[in-house]
Amino acid sequence: MQDKLKILENHLKTSGMYVVGKNITIADISIVCALTKLFQFVLDEKQRKSIPTVTKYVEHCRAMEQFTKVFGKLWLC
């Protein structure tokens, strides 16, 4: 899984805040939903330090009103 997260980390470093373009898209929604449980139950603080851009991305998207209305506040492992 770490190798896949590193790919996303490198992509986000070059693409900006979102996976495609300058606005959130269905791609971001799908990725963040898929990563949420991983961030809540698997990736501890030490592991998240190796993917700071992905961590910021997930935290940013999950802080959006549209996410918090559906999923509540994000808590991390």
Image (cartoon, helix red, strand yellow):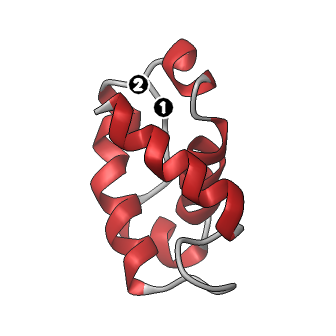
Q: Percent x, y for residue 8?
A: 48, 52
Judging depth in this view, the residue of 51 and 39 nearest the camera is: 51
* Crowding at mark 2 (Cα within 10 Å: few <14, some 14-19, many 20+): some
Residue 28 vertical position relative to residue 12 in the rendered view, above or below: below
Residue occupying the point 36% across, 29% down: 2
Question: Element under label 1?
Answer: loop
Judging depth in this view, the residue of 77 and 24 nearest the camera is: 24
Mark 2 and mark 1: Cα distance apart in space: 8 Å
Left or right? Give the position of 6 relative to 16.
left
Residue 71 vertical position relative to residue 7 in the rendered view, above or below: below
Q: Residue 56 carries which label?
A: none
Left or right? Give the position of 23 relative to 73.
right
Residue occupying the point 55% across, 13% down: 46
Residue 71 vertical position relative to residue 51 in the rendered view, above or below: below
Q: Which mark is residue 43?
A: 2
Q: Percent x, y for residue 26?
A: 38, 84
Q: How many labels does the image show?
A: 2
* Crowding at mark 1 (Cα within 10 Å: few <14, some 14-19, many 20+): some
Residue holding disc 1: 76
Of tags 2 and 1, the one toward the viewer is 2
Q: Which of marks 2 and 1 is nearer the N terminus?
A: 2
- Inspect the image, locate mark 2, and give the three-letter code of the amino acid beneath it: Leu
